[in-house]
Amino acid sequence: MIIAIDGPAASGKGTLAKKLAAHFSLPLLDTGLLYRATARALLSAGAPLNDAAHATRAAQSLDIAKIDEHDLRGAAMGEAASVVAAIPSVRAALIDAQRRFANQPGGAVLDGRDIGTVIAPHANLKIFVTASPEVRADRRYKEALGRGEEVEYDVILADIRKRDERDSGRSAAPLKIAEDAVLLDTSAMSIEDVLAAAIRLVEAKSAAAKPPG
Ligand code: CDP
């Protein structure tokens, strides 16, 4: 089964994807890491993030099986990733590897922004995970405090709004809900509730796919 999970920053899609993949023993690809790794390549070379030729070469040379997650997780890299992710040739360079991952025998879970719309429009189940910008900012704020970082809620909220706007407003594979996706608004849901809801969706799809009798 191919499960596509899309949604905006801090919606909980990454956590859900990880737990769902573990629950059903499916391989998982966090596609945000591909854009983060591309952005890191530019930053470490001292190149501007809008250098399309450089960014495309960096994306082409990524090996999706060997992404070193070191330095990739923070908010600054997420912001940088959303700049390179708006470059159409960067997205094009990453499509085949993502599709191969999605189409491997036995299925896979992928999370990102365009999995249900572009990478795996044929996915068996598409979940669009969202939450209000305030709830998402609050989650990021608490995570940062937990790591001992000094952060301001208002700054995080402004960053989330800016990233939503860039990801939804770009012309190349903008963040949008696929027509056949199930919307999960996690604003008032715990991680356990979200996982339980998603497991029910997967089970309903599997039952519907089985021949009667
Ligand atoms: O976890 P968070 O949502 O903050 O970030 P992420 O999923 O790692 O994505 C970082 C950035 O990469 C996003 O803001 C998008 O601009 C971009 N991205 C994308 O364009 N397409 C994807 N399939 C995944 C990420």
Image: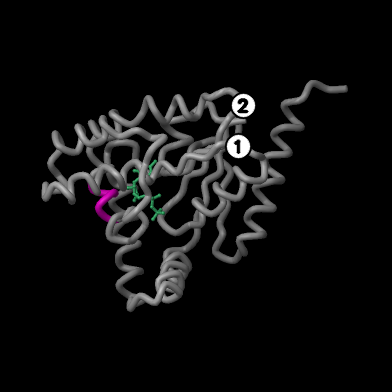
Q: SS at mark 2?
A: loop
Left or right: residue 161 compared with residue 80: right
Q: Residue furthest right?
A: 213
Q: What's under tag 2, amino acid-wise? A: Gly
* Magenta span: chief secondary structure: helix
Q: Position of residue 163 (x, y in %)?
A: 31, 56
Check disc 2: other Cα within 10 Å, few if <14, some if 14-19, many if 20+. few
Q: What's under tag 1, amino acid-wise? A: Leu
User: Is 141 inside the magenta-drawn segment?
Assistant: no
Nearest the viewer among 47 and 152 is: 47
**Residue sitting at x 67%, y 51%:** 197
Left or right: residue 174 compared with residue 104: left
Find residue 73 and report its image quarter: bottom left
Left or right: residue 136 compared with residue 198: left
- Residue where numbered disc 1 is placed: 26
Q: Position of residue 208 (x, y in %)?
A: 74, 30
- Residue 75 lies, with reference to residue 208, above or below; the image says below
**Stretch of the chain drawn in magenta:** 79-83
- Residue 95 lies, with reference to residue 35, above or below; the image says above
**Residue sitting at x 14%, y 34%:** 53
Callout 2–callout 1 Cβ contact below 8 Å? yes
Left or right: residue 14 compared with residue 42: right
Q: Position of residue 203 (x, y in %)?
A: 73, 39
Image quarter in which the N terminus is found: top right
Q: SS at mark 1?
A: loop
Nearest the viewer among 41 and 13 is: 41
Q: Position of residue 152 (x, y in %)?
A: 33, 77
Check disc 1: other Cα within 10 Å, few if <14, some if 14-19, many if 20+. some
- Residue where numbered disc 2 is placed: 106
